[in-house]
Image (tube, helix red, strand yellow):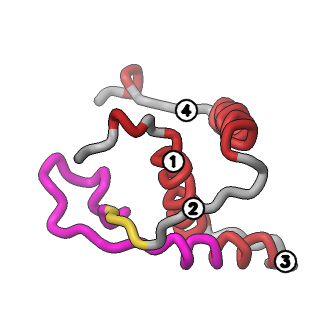
């Protein structure tokens, strides 16, 4: 991919989009959401974008761990952020919110 064809995203646009989507989720699901699940499947972050082949393994994520890490992030007095780690946990929660919005007619089974 050439520099002219680079796929880029502005963090400001991403922030605005997340605020809009989370606002809609809060309106629909409430200000506190019962995630009503714990374990989920995920692809290891290092394998998600590095290959054009199928990942070698799936990993189990855990929403209870994701929520604990969210609380830990918010409680860090020094404001320290571990981008890859913190985002990985937030993505688990966001994917659950997305799954809660899927109409039941679109769910498998």
Mark 1 vs 2: CB contact within 8 A: yes
Q: Residue at coordinates 26% horizontally, 44% vertically from top-left?
A: 108
State the separation of the CA atoms marked 3 and 4. Answer: 28 Å
Of pointers 3 and 4, the one earlier in the residue sequence = 4
State the separation of the CA atoms marked 1 and 3. Answer: 34 Å
Image: 31 above or below 2: below
**Residue stretch in magenta:** 43-68
At which x and y percent is residue 27?
74, 37
Element class at badge 4? loop
Which one is nearer the viewer's eye here, 108 or 25? 108
Of pointers 1 and 4, the one earlier in the residue sequence = 4
State the separation of the CA atoms marked 2 and 4. Answer: 29 Å
State the separation of the CA atoms marked 3 and 2. Answer: 29 Å
Of tags 2 and 4, the one toward the viewer is 2
- Which residue is labeled 1 in the image? 100
Which one is nearer the viewer's eye here, 63 or 78? 63
Mark 1 vs 3: CB contact within 8 A: no
- Which residue is labeled 4 in the image? 9
Q: Is residue 37 left or right of residue 25?
A: left
């Amino acid at each position: 991919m050439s520099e002219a064809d680079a796929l880029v995203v502005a963090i400001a646009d991403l922030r605005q989009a997340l605020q809009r989507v989370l606002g809609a989720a809060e309106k629909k699901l409430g200000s506190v959401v019962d995630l009503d699940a714990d374990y989920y499947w995920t692809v290891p972050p290092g394998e998600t974008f590095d290959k054009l082949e199928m990942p070698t393994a799936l990993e189990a994520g855990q929403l209870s761990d994701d929520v604990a890490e969210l609380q830990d992030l918010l409680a860090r007095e020094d404001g320290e952020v571990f981008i890859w780690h913190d985002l990985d946990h937030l993505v688990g929660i966001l994917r659950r919110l997305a799954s809660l919005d899927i109409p039941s007619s679109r769910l498998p089974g």
